[in-house]
Amino acid sequence: MRRFDMKGAVFIALQEMIMEEFDLDLWHQLLDAAGSDGVYTATLNYDDQAILDLVAALCTRLELSREDALRHFGRYLFGFLHRGYPVFADSKPDFFDFIASIDGVIHMEVMKLDDQARPPKIEVHPHPAGGIQLFYSSERNLCHLAEGLLQGAADHFGIAIEIEQVCCRLQGADRCEFRINQA
């Protein structure tokens, strides 16, 4: 199994979400179930399996599907990341321009800060029927987290969106494909 690193900021965001929406006791239960000490530094890298273990523990405790838990966390994570790095979204006039900038701007900046980072590959194209077609490629297979991040971005820009996942790596496709339209 291949190991990938994830920034501590993602772990801190999960902790913050649990503390805001639930309580400290649940966070401690998740840490115990995942075998984690819960000490994370935003700029350090951690094995991404650790975040998946925490999400799995959350799913067990709250009887959620992994997909729903990752979508919910992704939606929260957008706001958390925006508070720390508002320039990325605030410099774009709308949701669709922001989404189109993810790979060429945000992920490039991530790579400048950490040349070992492995952000997902995001391709965005206009869809002939309207909206956009987004291709997500990552060996992490966190497409449901990406879907939540998209919803969080839509919330930030004050629009409602419809997301259709056309194909998914988790079901054997080479990459995930989303069709996104303003609702």
Image (spheres, helix red, strand yellow):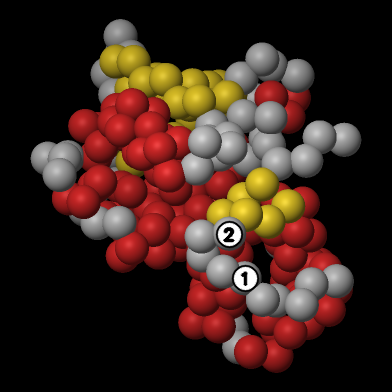
Q: Three-letter amino acid code at disc 2?
A: Leu
Residue 166 in view of the camera: yes
**Figure quadrant of residue 99:** top left
Residue 176 lies, in percent from the top left, at 58, 24
Which circle marks residue 40 in the picture? Answer: 1
In this rendering, the label closer to the viewer, 2 or 1: 2
Q: Which mark is residue 44?
A: 2
Which quarter of the picture shows residue 107?
Answer: top left
Query: Where's residue 155, x and y in %?
Result: 30, 54
Of the 4 image quadrants, the one containing the N terminus is: top right
Residue 149 placed where, x, y %? Answer: 44, 48
Q: Is 31 drawn above or below residue 116 in the view shown?
A: below
Against 32, residue 92 (above or below) is above
Q: In this view, does 22 lie above or below 73?
A: below
Q: What residue type is labelled 1?
A: Tyr
Q: Is residue 82 left or right of residue 48?
A: left
Q: Residue at x 25, y 46 (%)?
A: 88
> Residue 65: in sight, yes or no?
no
